[in-house]
Image: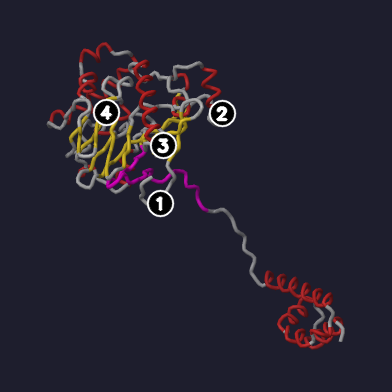
């Protein structure tokens, strides 16, 4: 029997001449085709199965009800809590986001056109650079230590440190020590509330003696330039409740703060600007404070300082020496003003250095 004859017989049997219905019926009666396989040439069989499969698809799609899908979900409008934890040996180190905002490129001590070119080549807006502020939580297993605490709300888009700190699973009462890299408002502002009360009731504040002496000096405050006056005021208010309770404890340069935590003087940005090297089980992390404020410009050209630097020439020398050392060591680095979460390595390039951020992991791992 020919192919047409098979189809006509099946149509008469079903009482319909709808080709889709007939084809679907034939698909389920494939045994008939197999039984007569030798009676049809291959070209005929290919045409039969193409017809059957096409009709089957149409029939199956038609069997489903029509659904109008719309993007009715509300916009999220905000990022989730911002923190990120890595391992450094036996330590857990968590970057905690405080906020950020636009900073003018004119703050950089460099030719405006050269800065413009660098921003454009990094796909950044040329009228501002998006700044980032973070603090760090170091859980040694025996102590909970903070390194810087953000602004405490000293800005319109900042002051999120405490919210994110709690979201990371910690409470202010658990903090034993707070190590400050320096006393600029975006690093110390978060240790007190708007009412001037200490936000960390059990924490001892540690910082370089020279840093404390400079910012808490009434005579220095009186001589301060307009751009520094606010920082002197913030430092004084932040220190007061801890001084009053005997929990303001400056250290000398190079002091071993805790087992596995070493202070290193990094002068220039401020007189007592300090970095902290964490060491545990053969692994290290260097938290460098404000050695770098504008990574996209200052890493390729470490000689460029910023208006925030107390001593721009000394800051540039400190930066050049530290970047050279860290890149040679292949050290893991954390910076409160690096793109969040601020963990990464330095790679030497033709001019200056490139920043290689750590790869995200949903597990707490050693980078």
| Residue indicated by mark 3 | 345
Q: Earlier in the sequence, mark 4 or mark 1?
A: 4
Secondary structure state at the residue bearing disc 1: loop
Q: CA separation, marks 3 and 2?
A: 21 Å
Q: Residue at x 39, y 27 (%)?
A: 324
Query: Which percent across, then down, holds residue 239?
Result: 20, 27
Give the vertical position of 360 relative to 220 (above or below): below
Q: CA separation, marks 4 and 1?
A: 32 Å
Is the residue under label 2 in contact with that under label 3 (CB below 8 Å)? no
Colour theme: secondary structure
| Residue indicated by mark 2 | 121
Residues packed near mark 4 inside 10 Å, few (<14), some (14 to 19) or many (20 plus): many
Q: CA separation, marks 3 and 4?
A: 19 Å
Query: Which percent across, then down, holds residue 241?
Result: 17, 30
Q: Is 79 colored magenta in this rendering?
A: yes
Residues packed near mark 3 inside 10 Å, few (<14), some (14 to 19) or many (20 plus): many
Mark in front: 4 vs 1: 4
Q: Earlier in the sequence, mark 1 or mark 2?
A: 2
Secondary structure state at the residue bearing disc 2: helix
Q: Earlier in the sequence, mark 3 or mark 4?
A: 4
Q: CA separation, marks 4 and 2?
A: 34 Å
Please name whichever residue, 147 or 322, is drawn nearer the observer in this view of the structure.
322
The label number, if any, that marks residue 362 in the structure image: 1
Quarter occupied by residue 204: top left
| Residue indicated by mark 4 | 264
Secondary structure state at the residue bearing disc 3: strand
Q: Earlier in the sequence, mark 3 or mark 2?
A: 2
Is the residue under label 3 in contact with that under label 1 (CB below 8 Å)? no
Q: Residue at x 44, y 39 (%)?
A: 357
Secondary structure state at the residue bearing disc 4: strand
């Amino acid at each position: 029997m020919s192919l047409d004859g098979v189809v006509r017989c099946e149509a008469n049997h079903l009482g319909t001449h709808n080709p889709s219905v007939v084809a679907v019926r034939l698909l389920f009666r494939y045994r008939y085709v197999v039984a007569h396989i030798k009676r049809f040439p291959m070209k005929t069989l290919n045409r039969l199965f193409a017809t059957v499969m096409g009709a089957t698809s149409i029939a199956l799609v038609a069997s489903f009800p029509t659904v109008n899908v719309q993007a009715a979900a509300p916009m999220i409008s905000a990022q989730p809590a911002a923190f990120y934890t890595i391992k450094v040996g036996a330590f857990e180190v968590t970057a905690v986001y405080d906020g950020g905002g636009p900073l003018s490129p004119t703050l950089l001590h460099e030719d405006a056109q050269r800065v413009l070119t660098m921003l454009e080549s990094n796909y950044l807006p040329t009228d501002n650079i998006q700044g980032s502020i973070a603090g760090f939580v170091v859980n040694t297993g025996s102590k909970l230590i903070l390194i810087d605490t953000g602004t405490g709300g000293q800005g319109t888009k900042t002051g999120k440190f405490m919210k994110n700190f709690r979201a990371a699973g910690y409470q202010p009462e658990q903090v034993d020590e707070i190590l400050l890299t320096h006393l600029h408002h975006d690093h110390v502002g978060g240790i007190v509330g708007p009412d001037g009360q200490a936000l960390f009731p059990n924490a001892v504040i540690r910082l370089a003696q020279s840093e404390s002496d400079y910012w808490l000096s009434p005579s220095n405050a009186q001589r301060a330039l307009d751009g520094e006056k606010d920082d002197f005021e913030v430092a004084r208010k932040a220190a007061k409740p801890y001084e009053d309770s005997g929990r303001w404890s400056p250290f000398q340069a190079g002091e071993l703060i805790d087992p596995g935590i070493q202070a290193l003087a990094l002068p220039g940005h401020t007189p007592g600007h300090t970095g902290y090297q964490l060491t545990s089980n053969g692994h290290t992390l260097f938290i460098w404070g404000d050695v770098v404020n504008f990574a996209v410009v200052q890493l390729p050209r470490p000689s460029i300082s910023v208006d925030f630097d107390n001593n721009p020439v000394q800051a540039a020398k400190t930066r050049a020496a530290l970047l050279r050392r860290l890149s040679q060591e292949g050290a893991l680095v954390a910076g409160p003003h690096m793109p969040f979460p601020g963990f990464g390595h330095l790679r030497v390039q033709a001019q200056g250095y490139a920043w290689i951020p750590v790869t995200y992991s949903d597990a707490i791992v050693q980078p």
